[in-house]
Amino acid sequence: KAGVTQTPRYLIKTRGQQVTLSCSPISGHRSVSWYQQTPGQGLQFLFEYFSETQRNKGNFPGRFSGRQFSNSRSEMNVSTLELGDSALYLCASSIGQGLASYEQYFGPGTRLTVT
Amino acid sequence: AQSVTQPDIHITVSEGASLELRCNYSYGATPYLFWYVQSPGQGLQLLLKYFSGDTLVQGIKGFEAEFKRSQSSFNLRKPSVHWSDAAEYFCAVGAVTNAGKSTFGDGTTLTVKP
């Protein structure tokens, strides 16, 4: 079974631009969560989508948004990029229901650099 | 609110030696607890999980962890470390009411000496 895939793997953007990251979960998984990983803040939860609905949200500004499609693929968007948005963005998928929803399988991440 | 503390930022052990990585959590109810490993340039891989029942859980790659409610701890252990175990290890807690949202510790970097 293929794992979680994230595209692109690396991205360089300029301050003020916007960016869209994509995540394809494991086949059969209906939940997709997004995390931001930085050396200073560690792993921080952004949001989680299940069956095309946002089910949980972390403490990030409204510049960070996401969506999930009917095939469970998810995208996250960051508008008006700031230098502090430079990070590794990790996507994790799970079955989404019952205890198995807590078992998350992570993709390799997208490394975003904002200059 | 739930939180996770990993007291050791960096640990160095010799190959073949035993390993224990510490994790303390704060959560009002029975937590769901996890250990993940991250190799450089990679995402996180789930090593083991605890939901309920037997407090000693076995994971992949020869790892085990013990849940101690009285100490709010979930320490990761391995009897004999291999060079390939060098990586960063994260402890995480999941909330019963928040599936899909885990709170992670800051991680412990493991260096293995030959």
Image (cartoon, grey):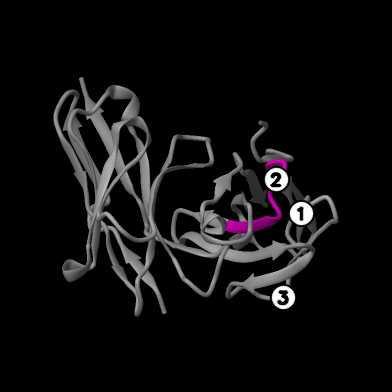
Mark carried by residue A74? 1
Q: Is A9 drawn above or below residue B104 in the view shown?
A: above
Q: Is A52 drawn above or below residue B35 in the view shown?
A: below
In the picture as drawn, the residue positioned furthest to the front comes out as B53
Going from the N terminus, do you reach mark 2 or mark 1 first? 2
Q: Could you tell me which secondary element the residue under label 2 belongs to?
A: loop
Q: Residues within 10 Å of mark 3 (few under 14, many from 20)?
A: few
Q: Chain of mark 3?
A: A
Q: Nearer the viewer, residue A81 or B15?
A: B15
Mark carried by residue A25? 2
* Amino acid type assigned to the residue bearing label 3 in the image: Gly
* Amino acid type assigned to the residue bearing label 1 in the image: Ser
Q: Residue placed at 40% from the left, 74% from the top? A: B2
**Would residue A64 be visible to someone looking at this image?**
no
- State yes or no: discs 2 and 1 in contact (Cβ < 8 Å): yes
Q: Which residue is mark 3?
A: A62
